[in-house]
């Protein structure tokens, strides 16, 4: 999940996402999802938690698929 991600409507509808995520319709073609109003930072634990939560919601809907498993805090 990036700071700004586009989802084509042909793959399904974007579910309601938690605040502060914004969902912007792109005509009748799809949805632009903006994860945070400020620039996304990998050093901000709140941004990381929000990204994981949104990614999980989108995975449950089949809109995205995890390609690489996240590293653990211990690098294993």
Image (spheres, rainbow, N blue to C red):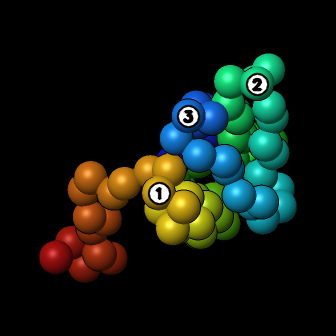
Q: Give the Cα separation between the discs numbered 1 and 2.
A: 20 Å
* Residue at position x 21%, y 72% in the image: 75
* Residue at position x 51%, y 68% in the image: 60
Q: Give the Cα separation between the discs numbered 3 and 1.
A: 12 Å
Closer to the camera, 42 or 30? 30
Which residue bears the numbered disc 1? Answer: 62
Which residue bears the numbered disc 3? Answer: 10
Quadrant of the image containing the C terminus:
bottom left
Q: Give the Cα separation between the discs numbered 2 and 3.
A: 10 Å
Mark 3 or mark 1: whose residue is earlier in sequence: 3
Which residue bears the numbered disc 2? Answer: 28
Question: Among all residues in the image, which is located at the extreme top?
Answer: 27
In the image, residue 47 lies at what x, y percent?
63, 59
Q: What numbered label is drawn on residue 31?
A: none
In terms of secondary structure, where does tag 3 sit? helix
Q: Nearer the viewer, mark 3 or mark 1?
A: 3
């Amino acid at each position: 999940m990036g700071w700004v991600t586009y989802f084509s409507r042909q793959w399904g509808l974007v579910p309601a996402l938690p605040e502060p995520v914004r969902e912007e319709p792109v005509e009748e073609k799809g949805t632009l999802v903006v994860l945070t109003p400020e620039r996304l930072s990998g050093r901000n634990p709140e941004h990381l938690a929000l990204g994981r939560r949104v990614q999980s919601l989108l995975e449950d809907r089949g809109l995205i698929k995890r390609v690489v498993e996240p590293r653990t805090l211990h690098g294993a």
